[in-house]
Image (spheres, rainbow, N blue to C red):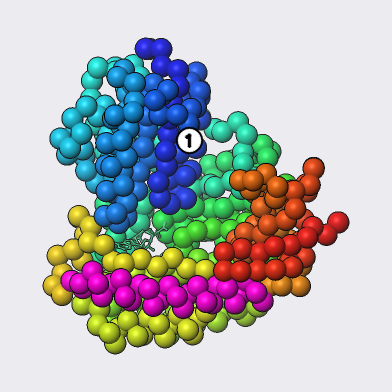
Amino acid sequence: MQKTEKFFIQTFGCQMNVYDGWRIATMLEHHGMVRTDNVSDADIIILNTCAVRAKATDKVFSALGRIRRAKKPSALFGIVGCVARESGADAFRRIPDLNFVLGPQSYHKLPDILQNPDTKLLNIDLGGLEKFDELPQMERSPRVAYIPIQEGCNHCCTYCIVPYTRGREISRAYNDVIRDTIHAAKTGAIEICFLGQNVNGYKYTDETGHTYRLSDLIRETAKIPEIMRIRFTSSYPTEMTDDLIEMFAIEPKLLPFLNMPIQSGSQNILTKMNRPYTLELYCDIINKLKIARPDIQISSDFIVGFPGETDQDFAETMRIAQKIKYINSYSFKYSPRPHTAAALMPNQVPEITKAERLAKLDSYLNDVQREFNESCIDKTLLCLLEGPDKTGKHLIYRTPYMQQCIVEHIENAPELTDIKITAANKASLRGKIIN
Ligand code: SAH
Ligand code: F3S
């Protein structure tokens, strides 16, 4: 193997990519390399990419342009993840000196480029779960351990490139997930976040014919003494089955916070998005969740300006946002993506209309988020330490609702502690640790 000593990795996009980034770093460390934050010092440069919106893909290619100029002439550079799968060999045409293009299910092949640095490595196959078996375990787990339980998505929303980039849905073996969860707990994890593009669709049938669901994973994980908090993301509304809803009632370690994207409040647009649930059903699920766990709060993703979205459709999105009062949401302008049906639909909405609708929705969602944060003042919340802030003068904790809570820096701060909330704005809370 060529002596390659330092690697640089930059991750874009979702939690699954963050997880993939950790695994890639661990794999390279096992090959005797050390991480550097300096591109011009690196022997191998990896961009771990997101393709969900056109802007995300553009960002990757402009970063590649910058890296090309800054890197050592001998350094290898390439992309892994969803843009690799989206662009395939075309990435080599756009950036001819690129060394490797590896899809989200083939990044474990990265060491091949170290063995054959003079070749170009292209692998965007959908290899299923192979990568999970081939990659080394992380030696130390972060306090919040992200554990992927399924990969890919069968929902095929008409706007979404993920079923193309990450493939059909596959659930990991129950025993493998539990093994990884125990390993995380024994090496430092306090919180487990189960990950999947369609995480609550998790379904694994073992050789005896027994089928395991996400509720089984939660029940088993809650028995691990080191694990104090459990959550999962991202959920599809109609996969929110009664066994999973019941977990919110009976399992106190499961946090009272759920990301369950609605995307649009217009029945007509939901149908065109191929999200075939009714608004009534969606609201019924939320009602059941609130009965199970009265303090539960919901977050959502929204897309505005989907092809054919009228002012009336958008008004219905505003109405559902007002009804549900999501405490934290992500909203996006619809972005036409290759390999998706919606990109070919008529009546694409002009950019200016999308921007106006997004500004209106965002302004409302921000108001609700600020109101919710303010409603936490004087309450005591059990919070998990994230680490010091940039100045080093404060510590950042996460509340059970994933709000950022800032406290004064103290030595030997507790990892999990009650914090009395003293102030709030849209972005964060402030508080005092209660001993
Ligand atoms: N369930 C997935 C969702 C992946 S995409 C998960 O693992 O999180 C994340 C969000 O991006 C979606 O919920 C959707 O709101 C948004 N999105 C997906 N495709 C998009 C597109 N073409 N244009 C704008 N937003 C999009
Ligand atoms: Fe994408 Fe829809 Fe699946 S948003 S990841 S196709 S649920």
Q: Would residue 227 be counted in the magenta stretch?
A: no
Q: What residue is rendered at 48% in x and 35% in y? A: 23
Magenta extent: 348-375
Amino acid tagged 1? Arg
Q: Which residue is drawn at 50% across and 18% down?
A: 32
Residue 363 lies in the magenta-colored region: yes
In front: 155, or 85?
A: 85
Residue 401 higher or lower than 210, as above or below:
below
Residue placed farthest to the top in the image? Answer: 2
Quadrant where the C terminus is found in the figure: bottom right
Q: How crowded is mark 1: few (under 14 residues within 10 Å), some or many (20 or more)?
A: many
List x then y, in percent, for residue 64: 29, 36
* Most common secondary structure along the magenta stretch: helix
Closer-to-camera residue (123/17):
17
Is 73 located above or below residue 223 in the figure?
Answer: above
Q: Which residue lies furthest to the right in this view?
A: 435
x 36%, y 85%: residue: 316
Q: In this view, does 391 lie to the left or right of 239?
A: right
Q: Mark 1 points at which residue?
A: 23
Quadrant holding the N terminus: top left
